Amino acid sequence: MKVSLIVALALLMTATVATAQHQHDAPVTEISGKDHPEQIPDTMAYMNWLQANSVAALGVNPTLDEQEQHDNALRHQDWKLARLRLNADDDKKIRKELAVYRAKFEKFNKQYTAFAEKGWVKPNVFWAGMAQIISETRGNLEKNLSEDGHKNYEDGVALLRSHTRFFTTNGGVL
């Protein structure tokens, strides 16, 4: 699963860089979340947080090594989510929503990777699909978490945003 994400992002970056190189005069701009968190796009900030805090589902008939890796990932998720100081109800809801997000992401990424492997790389399609999945997840969390739980989740995203570095050329993602 991680390989598919890496392939998709590598193809996305290759296509974007190739386009930027073709334009000759496209300067690369770095946006630091530390200095300008408001300039980090919401889609990027929320995607980073959701990816960092979600765990892929365990496959059917996992090996002992796969089971151990999954258990370790869940323990790491426990540690990260504990920092949000959620009540038990919000903790249950956010874990459920993170699982739904990750399943949607894995399905979308697998489909996009299959297209990319055939040479049909369209970065706008990738980001539009991701924006839809992220928007649905954000809406569900806003609707289902308590006011305090939602604030703590948003604080977690803001913290990660402040540690994000984003590279762009003519408004496009590198």
Image: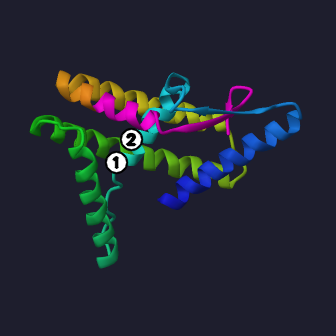
Q: Which residue position holds label 1? A: 54
Q: Which residue position holds label 2? A: 50
Q: Residue at x 86, y 33 (%)?
A: 23
Residue 170 placement, left or right of 145:
right
What distance separates the C-alpha of mark 1 from that of mark 2?
6 Å
Residue sitting nearer the eye, 98 or 86? 86
On the image, the x and y values in percent for residue 133 come to 43, 34
- Amino acid carrying label 2: it is Leu
Residue sitting nearer the eye, 127 or 37? 37
Secondary structure at numbered mark 1: loop
Q: Are marks 1 and 2 in contact (CB under 8 Å)?
A: yes
Q: Where, by quadrant of the figure, is residue 73 drawn?
A: bottom left
On the image, the x and y values in percent for residue 124 come to 64, 33
On the image, the x and y values in percent for residue 65 come to 33, 76
Magenta residue check for 167: yes
Magenta residues? 153-174
Residue 89 placement, left or right of 126:
left
Secondary structure at numbered mark 2: helix
Q: Residue at x 80, y 43 (%)?
A: 18
Image: 119 above or below 86: below
